[in-house]
Amino acid sequence: MDLSKSIDFLLENAGAVIQYRLRKEILNNISKTEEENMLEQVYQTPLFKMLLDNIKPNGFIGWGMHNGDKRQKNEIDDGEASARLLSYYGIPKENPIIKNFISAFRNEDTLQEEFSHNGAVRNMYKTRHIGTNSGNLLMSLIYTMQSMLGYGDDEEVKYFQEICLKGFKRVVEADEISDITRYDPSINTKLNYLYHIEPNDYFPCSYTLTNLAYTSVWRTPENIKMMANAINHINAIMPKSDTPFKGFNSNGLYVRINKQLKGPAIAFSQPLRAFTKDNQDAIFYRRPLTEIAMLGVGENVGIIRESVANVEEALAADGILKIKFDSSYNKRKYIDMLRLPNAYGDIGLEIDYKSETALWCDRTFWAVQFLTLVKINPSITNK
């Protein structure tokens, strides 16, 4: 598909982050001097300046990770939010901020210090290795954030890639969800989490997908083919929910840890969804489509193939990926999930969304990026 209209729209209207990533990652027409100048504009954006205030002397950024500490100075004063922002903004891995952050992730004394401020985070650190096989708890998060920052193929952490692969392989081997999960009718919680997995069980989730999307060592033709088959199989065998993403595991797949049921990091326990132009869900679904495309599976995944067709149709008129909201509430909810980097929202790259043009820029850049990832990655066969 000719993306020239979309690219022209972005070059004329998009903010600093999209301009930088478009030139560097997609158009590949940026000189070293231009890159430095454009990066300087990214560094002047409000969220990046906010992140600078959250850097600690030991290199760690924010209070803990994914735990909403009351000591947070601002909305991204959190390790995961900070790592996601640096990744989404395309900050080079050689940047001292990232290098120091990586060093903090790999220093046991630093981590123990960062997760020592109250009982909840101390327990989070103490149990950090439990449930890693399903992407649960702290170490999966720490490994994945390192991958997003460009360091996931290092010797210190690359073994997590094999753990991630095993989760997807486990799905391929299953005929139905009951082959993977335990069912305990004696469990009677408020939300009725009857299906669960044990701490050592392998199961794919959003973090294990992300880790593979941002790393390379695991990539062989066999593994890429397996990933395509696994994602297709997830959509074939996982039970559908009448209320997708109500909570984060609406059909009740949890991991049993210390006699408690805890939620894996958005386990892929229900079908993934293709892109449709008028979808107004606030909970993320463009992001996993992008990460699946990053795996190099081409159009061998059904929801990718369907999404490509829908994106191309939506862009056909003027090259802009718009959305018509059926209420102002849904529009506010949609935008709110773009505004800040977090585990449960789509990626937002504009400074604010006060104008619809900013929203169209955000969606149109995603469309260009997504189509480019699908088309340039080597295709594989499912035969």
Image (spheres, grey):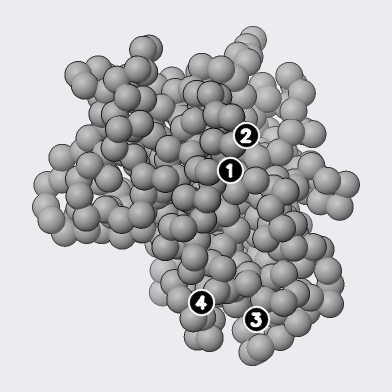
| Element at label 1 | helix
The residue that disc 1 covers is 36
| Element at label 2 | helix
The residue that disc 3 covers is 121
Which one is earlier in the sequence, the residue at label 1 or at label 4?
1
The residue that disc 4 covers is 68
Which one is earlier in the sequence, the residue at label 3 or at label 1?
1
Could you say which is closer to the camera, residue 294 or residue 173? 294
Up-down relation of residue 41 to residue 172 (above or below): below
Q: Is residue 306 visible?
A: no
| Element at label 4 | loop
Task: Count neighbours of disc 2 (C-alpha within 10 A) and say few if under 14, some if 14 to 19, many if 20 or more.
Answer: few
The residue that disc 2 covers is 32
- Circle 3: residue type: Val
* Residue furthest out toward the right: 155
- Mark 3 and mark 4: Cα distance apart in space: 10 Å
- Circle 4: residue type: Gly
Residue 124 location, x and y as percent?
68, 76
Q: In the figure, is residue 227 to the left or right of 347?
A: right
Q: Which mark is nearer the camera, 2 or 4?
A: 2
Q: Which mark is nearer the camera, 3 or 1?
A: 1
- Mark 2 and mark 4: Cα distance apart in space: 38 Å
Residue 342 location, x and y as percent?
48, 60
Task: Count neighbours of disc 1 (C-alpha within 10 A) and say few if under 14, some if 14 to 19, many if 20 or more.
Answer: few
Could you say which is closer to the camera, residue 192 or residue 58? 58
Residue 207 location, x and y as percent?
61, 51
State the residue at coordinates (53%, 43%).
37
Q: Where on the picture, by quarter, is residue 367? A: top left
Is mark 2 in CB contact (under 8 Å) with mark 1? yes
Q: Is residue 220 visible?
A: yes
